[in-house]
Amino acid sequence: MSNSYKVEGIILNSKDIKEYDRIYSVFSRQVGVFNILGVGVRKPRAKLASGLEPFTYGDIFLIKGRFLDRVRGTVIFEQFSYLKQELDFLTKSRRLFSILNQLLPTAEPNEDVFDLLYSYLRLLNELAYLKQLKQGQKTFQGKARNYQSMLTNLSDDERDQNNKESKRKKRQDGKLKEEVVHSKNKRTDYQKVNKAQNYSPVNQGSSRTKLDYWQRWLKTSLSAEKIEEVNDLLPRVLLWKVLYRHGYWAYSSVCSQCGRKLKAVTAEYSFFFSQGVFCSSCADTGSWKQKPRLRLKRDTLKLINFFISQEIGDVFRLKIDQQTGNDFKLFTQWFVEHILEKKVVL
């Protein structure tokens, strides 16, 4: 029997040991959460180091060891580079991965949770890209306004002359690789021009063409405030999905004591860790009146039920007011701390 094997996994975190080695926590599709040993990966020229960075998804080739299996090689599928460039995105994800590493059982495969984690990283990577795009807007908005004011002050003859001089100069400098001219307005279609890497429309074509580019570029679907809100919610959404799939939480629409449907007019329910969600009348009767509980707002319960039943990307559809968002974050914090029996930071 061969002592080598391959797993498809995501690197959760790492810990330095000895002088040049690291222990990595991996969540794999085939095995679940387990630890592996990277020998010599902290050396300056280590070949395996790049494929074992946290938030890296790929194939990991292992050799069975006495205590920990040793990494023999990696094949990188995705490294989520935009996510790693944003400090706030990276910090929240590291906190989430640390909690998941404690919540998930060791060496217990769970393909649903693995797919959830991969979807989370893909979605967060796209969100980080959008944030960078929004930051680029602010840099170019001032330039776009300057071009707009300049165009309004130029006559048609002056504008055409400037365009011809600009094109001639770019041709001489060798920067304009290709030109596609419309027969009607004699304007260049720069969407089909210069496909080279690092191409910037800022340095190409007329002022009006640049302005058109910026106007199209500024029309993105998410505002900067919405991006920050989703970045704050996504780790908690993934956390509730994982808690639900591992039996820490049940979809709650009825009282766990009397079995009646929770009343929509009630603003607050009670949650007992041993039983579940109670309506206000059951929670204040009998022996339950003296037992410790968590106050669960009605809107918080609705959010939790929505998150565990819908796709992770559906968080973009929600409009959550500040008070409801704060109550949801606070209840999530209390719930996870009770399970782990220690303070956590989300």
Image (cartoon, rainbow, N blue to C red):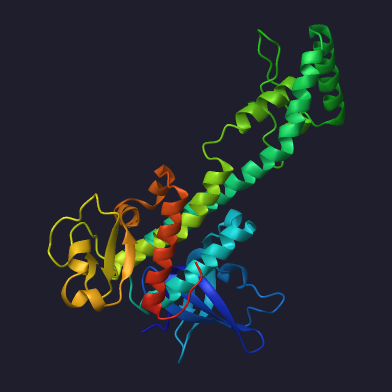
| Side (left or right) of 217 relative to 36 | right
* Residue 4, visible in the rendered structure: yes
Judging depth in this view, the residue of 128 and 338 nearest the camera is 338
| Side (left or right) of 75 relative to 27 | right
Residue 267 lies, with reference to residue 152, above or below; the image says below
Quarter occupied by residue 79 = bottom right
> In the image, what residue occupies the spot 61% across and 28% down?
216
Judging depth in this view, the residue of 4 and 131 nearest the camera is 131
In the picture, the quarter occupied by the N terminus is bottom left
> In the image, what residue occupies the spot 60% across and 47% down?
131
Q: Position of residue 159 (x, y in %)?
A: 80, 13
* Residue 55, visible in the rendered structure: no
Judging depth in this view, the residue of 48 and 146 nearest the camera is 146
Q: Position of residue 156 (x, y in %)?
A: 79, 8
Residue 210 lies, with reference to residue 111, above or below; the image says above
Residue 35 lies, with reference to residue 51, above or below; the image says below
> In the image, what residue occupies the spot 39% across and 82% down?
2
Quarter occupied by residue 20 = bottom right
Q: Position of residue 61 (x, y in %)?
A: 48, 74
Q: How many marks?
A: 0
| Side (left or right) of 250 relative to 128 | left
